[in-house]
Amino acid sequence: MKALTSKHLPSTTTTLIHRAIVGAPDWWRDAVIYQVYPRSFADSNGDGIGDLPGVTAHLDHLVELGVDAVWLSPFYRSPQKDGGYDVADYREVDPLLGTLADVDALLAAAHEQGLRVLVDLVPNHTSSAHGWFQEALASAPGSAARDRYVFRTGRGELGEEPPNNWLSKFGGPAWTRVTEADDSPGEWYLHLFDSSQPDLNWENAQLHAEFEQVLRFWLDRGVDGFRIDVAHGLVKAPELPDWTGRTTTVTGRKRRPNLTDEGPMWDQDGVHEILRAWRQVVAEYPGDRALVAEAWVQPIERLARYVRPDETHQAFNFEFLKTRWSVPQYRAVITESLEANDSVGATTTWVLSNHDVVRHPSRLGLKKAGSFPAGIAATDEQPDEHRGLMRGRAASLLMLGLPGSAYLYQGEELGLPEATELPAEARQDPTFLGTDGKEIGRDGCRVPLPWVADAPAFGFSPSGASWLPQPASFARYALDSQLGVPGSTYEMYRAALHLRRVRRLGSGSLAWVVGLAGTRKKKVLAFINRDVMIVMNLGAAALPITPGCAVLITSRRLGIDAEGRQTIPRDTTVWLRFGS
Ligand code: NOJ
Ligand code: CA
């Protein structure tokens, strides 16, 4: 860290945390990557389920928005018990979502329009419908087929107790007992998630070879990389020791969910060997293909181990996503993220929303702003929609001003809130179904997108069908309600992405600025990235725009003070440029 003084900001202290990249960065280092959850993006054939042709038909939206790449959540053949994160065949497309030819068409269209495409790799578990698991069930204990999974004999005299005390993240024991071919009660298999998602055994060398082929299958088809599901869970501690800490995310809505995965089933050293091998595979292909790890580990230094030079290129920064609405917390998490990633030569990522968490405007609209419920039900505290949206926009503009790579989740560019009033019969998240609704689950952030305010299903589906019902309020969030409307959330994102690109903020620097005129340290976050100063005001007092600065973009309409100067109101982020 080096202290700087700027001639533009005479009374301030400026502390450089992160230097700009010199030369052209690898594409992913400053990329904005847009997550498509295919079943909720756009439905082309009217069955109410979004599909791959629907994605292809709307790629122009992503180009207009100005993102660099798309990450597609799973579209593989699947019984859809966990939104496709239960894969029955890694090389086939689920007929609900399309065909292999549709993937090829999507890749070709995306590449033609300058978008890269990452696909999801789900290596921790398969679906119980996968041929490997069906073969394992039909085979004897000790067989090669069973060795692809984690089968064990139970405890107790008759093996009637699970092999250890681990809990599934989705509730209940992490073990299910099978019936052997002769109808006798048999071995147990491990599933860190739903019982329909048996964990694979990454001690098995054949599995390594088989997965490498899966990677090559998609790389040969032209994907630009993979998002690796549950990257921190592939390897379990030898002997599978009991664990008395928390494992499950299912806690009931009154308690905070377990936000970091701890225990002998997570973040074992062995996972890094697997990631290294995959890095070598993608490196063989031209075009800078990239890997991003989903790893819910803590602290940030631990996460940085996943992005060492020979491992995954990126890892989602969930510490940023979990940050409360607090300047000291944002300052700390941003500093720690940049320092930890810089220490291994990696790029920091930033993310606020995805298909597993309550949408960030709704989290920020709660009394405890930025707290982290595992879903919001109609009977829970309802977020303040307006305040949440204002804060959500401020958080997004903060994120997009940071150096590094940013992940957007479909619909956040529209400012979509969480759907909190979905009827029980519509809900499909296995955490809801498996807990008799005690856990409300993740459906609220997965409601199909509104494209057109006065079309059936808000333009999601030509038939008006929608696999989850869309709230009436989605009309005012629909893309066509916001297109070309100054100050709309969509236009804010579009302008921010454009500015970020032309001012090269993604490959830029970060220097904290403390002591701007009129600010209080705990209420105002300010930093300089290249020639842009980003200021976020969380305090009640409106803040005068720094003299000598011009406003590039703002998350909310600015105020005017008694002397006629522009001011930054509460819960607002602005980007400023030195000079008029
Ligand atoms: C993380 C995925 O994002 C989530 O949706 C899924 O339920 C679990 N992994 C299990 O695959
Ligand atoms: Ca469809």
Image (cartoon, rainbow, N blue to C red):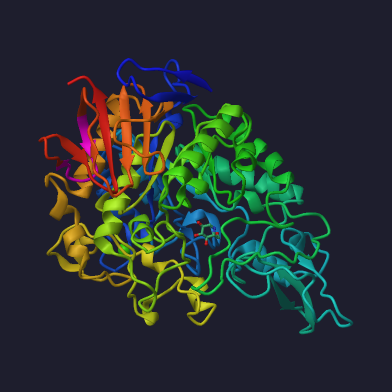
Q: Position of residue 401 (x, y in %)?
A: 35, 34
Left or right of 350 in this view: 304: right
Q: Is residue 555 magenta?
A: yes
Q: Is residue 108 visible?
A: no
Relative height, residue 58 to residue 125 (above, below):
above
Which quadrant is home to the C terminus?
top left
Whether residue 93 is visible here, answered yes or no, is yes
Image point 19% across, 43% down: which residue?
A: 491
In reply to whether residue 121 is colored magenta, the answer given is no
**Residue 211 in the image: x percent, y percent?**
63, 47
Specify the quadrant of the image occupied by residue 244: bottom right
Looking at the picture, tell me which residue is in the foreground, 381 or 59: 381
Q: Which residues are magenta?
A: 551-559
Give left or right: position of 277 versus 288: right
- Residue found at x 31% / y 57%: 41
Q: Residue at x 23, y 64 (%)?
A: 461
Left or right of 26, for residue 389: left
* Front position in the image: 203 or 46: 203
Q: Position of residue 107 (x, y in %)?
A: 37, 41
Q: Measured from the top left, where is residue 476 in percent x and y?
A: 17, 61
